[in-house]
Amino acid sequence: MSSATTSSRTSGTTSVRATGATGDSGATSDSGVTGAAGFSRSALLDARIELLLPAFRRVGGRVWSVPEPDQIYPEYLCLMHQVIRSTVPLMEAALARCQELAGPRGDGDPVAAALVPYWKKHIPEEWGHDEWLRQDLAAIGCDPDEVWRRIPPASAATLVGAQYYWIHHHHPACLLGHIAVVEGNPPDRKVAGELARRTGYPESGFRTLHRHAALDVKHRADLRELIDRLPLDDRLDASLGLSALHTVQSLIDMFEQLAMAFERGRRSSVPPLPGVDGAGD
């Protein structure tokens, strides 16, 4: 997910870039341009996602309102890495499945065929975003290799694993609903500075948020344009909604677990950089 999903409100930010939507579309056209009441499919998807965003923002506010935000931030970066490192592999799986469905001449599944150029363009745009999180950890004095030593929690596996299921056992277009969440609600440009103030860490430790505040604006526009021109039928349109809502709810559950632990006094267990004393203490 790249990342992940980030509310544009500082109090609600959670750093996994987000905004997507889901549910029945009621679409009346197979062109993919318009859905119920003449609204575009992308607008309907956004509206569905918005149904869960208030709860997402509330849990994000809890994450950054814990008594010691400097303790939760290293843990947050590790958690985000466990999610965002799946972004490129998910799209690579979707690309391979789309090529299979489209056929060697591209005259098979029309939706899959239309998605192949998008995946080929977007995959390189997401390369290395997990490494940005490791760089943020190092910038705040924490060991960036900690992300590889940890067992990813079941909440992260639930978030990502559903996408693999839908790609391989339903349709790879479902991944668009997930992407609509993690890239559809870019963080406000002021968020990184506010979190630096709250945690006491240097702003160089928030470069992932800084970068996604700019990048996701264009990615969101590209995705909306794609969704509106895909020849989706009602079944696939509803599938995108289901995928998006699953992503939002899974993120809520994941951040709820993180917030609860630190509201109860947990302290970060991310070790310091070798030779650096006190990081993460």
Image: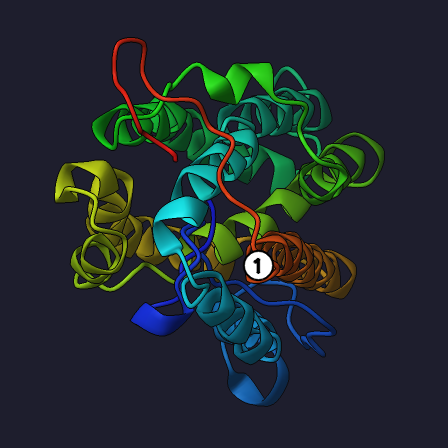
Q: Is residue 270 above or below residue 233?
A: above
Identify residue type, mark 1: Ala
- Is label 1 in a helix, a strand or a loop? helix
Q: Which of 88 and 99 lies nearest the eye of the viewer?
A: 88
Q: Where is residue 110 in the image (x, y as percent from the top left)?
A: 63, 40
Q: Which of 93 and 72 lies nearest the eye of the viewer?
A: 72
Q: Which of 62 and 3 lies nearest the eye of the viewer?
A: 62
Relative to 52, is 132 on the left or the right?
A: left
- For the point 64% across and 71% down, the residue is 29
Q: How is the image coloured?
A: rainbow
Res 138 → quadrant:
top left
Q: Can residue 192 be seen in this view?
A: yes
Relative to 236, is 5 on the left or the right?
A: left
In the rendered image, which quarter contains the C terminus?
A: top left
Q: In this view, does 130 lie above or below 8?
A: above
Q: Position of residue 251 (x, y in %)?
A: 61, 55
Q: Where is residue 54 in the image (x, y as percent from the top left)?
A: 54, 80
Report crowding for label 1: few under 14, some 14 to 19, many 20 or more residues within 10 A (C-alpha): many
Q: Which of 269 and 153 lies nearest the eye of the viewer?
A: 269
Which residue in the structure is indicated by mark 1?
A: 259
- For the point 21% across and 44% down, the residue is 201
- Most extreme residue toward the right is 169
Q: In this view, does 29 lie above or below 109?
A: below
